[in-house]
């Protein structure tokens, strides 16, 4: 019986490990977080277009639960919170020229360096014959284009009085699927991992995701 139980446990572990995948993102952290913040009451500050937006409300709910786990407490409108929290997100389509002579990469001065992965589409581009490249038909160059989507998240926490910025955290991940809603929970988990994190750091964060 013990051997059977051990066997079943091993089988279940293998099945679960086979369903797990890794979500990778890059996280940049800048903060002046006080050593001990006695008051973590906050309200969400919304940009124009975020009010009464069902998608944004869904993302706020996701962030609200994570902030609660970190000891933050949302207060109702009309009270005097200590902090305000801003949530921004965006998706950028990336098409990068690729040739056999170099490995493509994205450098975004706002989000940092992201190495590409994605779907290649081959294009044949005409160039003057005197540019002759060995191995290509005269007058034509074989170029591949790679398409990916860079999903970006920003969480900013600011003092209500004095408007001092306490934390500015950015997380981004390059994916093949354009739908950012699939990745927002993981971007939030990555951004808030070890909150507030090391000031001035940019690091790769990997999460194990069970599917």
Image (cartoon, grey):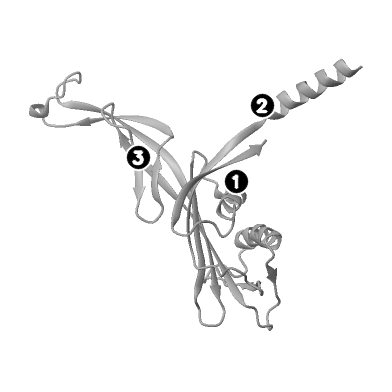
**Residue denoted by label 1:** 182
Q: CA distance from mark 3 to mark 1?
A: 23 Å
Q: Position of residue 155 (x, y in %)?
A: 54, 62
Q: Position of residue 127 (x, y in %)?
A: 15, 32
**Residue denoted by label 2:** 18
Say which label, 3 or 1, has the lower sequence index: 3
Say which label, 1 or 2, has the lower sequence index: 2
Q: Secondary structure at mark 2?
A: helix
Q: Residue furthest right?
A: 1
Q: Secondary structure at mark 3?
A: strand
Q: CA distance from mark 1 to mark 2?
A: 20 Å
Graded by Cα atoms within 10 Å as few (under 14), some (14 to 19) or many (20 or more), the crowding at tag 1 reads: few
Q: Nearer the viewer, residue 167 or 57?
A: 167
* Residue under the point 58% across and 47% down: 183
Q: Report how many numbered discs are placed on residues in the image.
A: 3
Q: Position of residue 124 (x, y in %)?
A: 26, 28
Q: CA distance from mark 2 to mark 3?
A: 30 Å
Quarter of the image for the N terminus: give it. Answer: top right
Q: Is residue 79 above or below residue 197?
A: below
Quarter of the image for the C terminus: give it. Answer: top right
Q: Position of residue 126 (x, y in %)?
A: 19, 31
**Disc 3 vs disc 1: which is toward the camera?**
3
Residue 102 located left or right of residue 58: left
Q: Quadrant of residue 75?
A: bottom right
The reply to whether the C-beta atoms of the residues labelled 1 and 2 are less than 8 Å apart is no
The reply to whether the C-beta atoms of the residues labelled 2 and 3 are less than 8 Å apart is no
* Residue under the point 58% across and 36% down: 22
**Residue denoted by label 3:** 105
Q: Residue furthest front?
A: 35
């Amino acid at each position: 019986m013990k051997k059977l139980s051990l066997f079943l446990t091993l089988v279940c572990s293998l099945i679960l490990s086979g369903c797990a995948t890794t979500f990778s993102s890059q996280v940049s952290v800048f903060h002046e977080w006080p050593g001990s913040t006695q008051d973590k009451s906050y309200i969400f500050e919304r940009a124009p277009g975020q009010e009464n937006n069902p998608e944004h409300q869904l993302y706020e709910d996701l962030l609200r639960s994570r902030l609660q786990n970190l000891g933050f407490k949302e207060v109702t409108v009309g009270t005097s919170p200590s902090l305000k929290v801003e949530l921004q997100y965006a998706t950028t389509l990336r098409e990068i020229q690729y040739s056999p002579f170099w490995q493509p990469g994205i450098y975004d001065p706002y989000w940092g360096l992201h190495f590409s992965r994605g779907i290649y589409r081959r294009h044949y581009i005409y160039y003057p014959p005197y540019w002759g490249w060995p191995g290509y038909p005269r007058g034509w160059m074989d170029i591949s284009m790679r398409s990916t989507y860079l999903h970006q998240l920003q969480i900013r926490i600011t003092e209500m009085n004095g408007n001092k910025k306490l934390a500015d955290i950015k997380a981004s991940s390059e994916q093949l699927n354009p739908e950012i809603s699939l990745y927002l929970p993981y971007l939030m988990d990555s951004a808030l991992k070890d909150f507030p994190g090391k000031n001035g750091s940019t690091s790769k964060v990997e999460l194990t995701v069970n599917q």
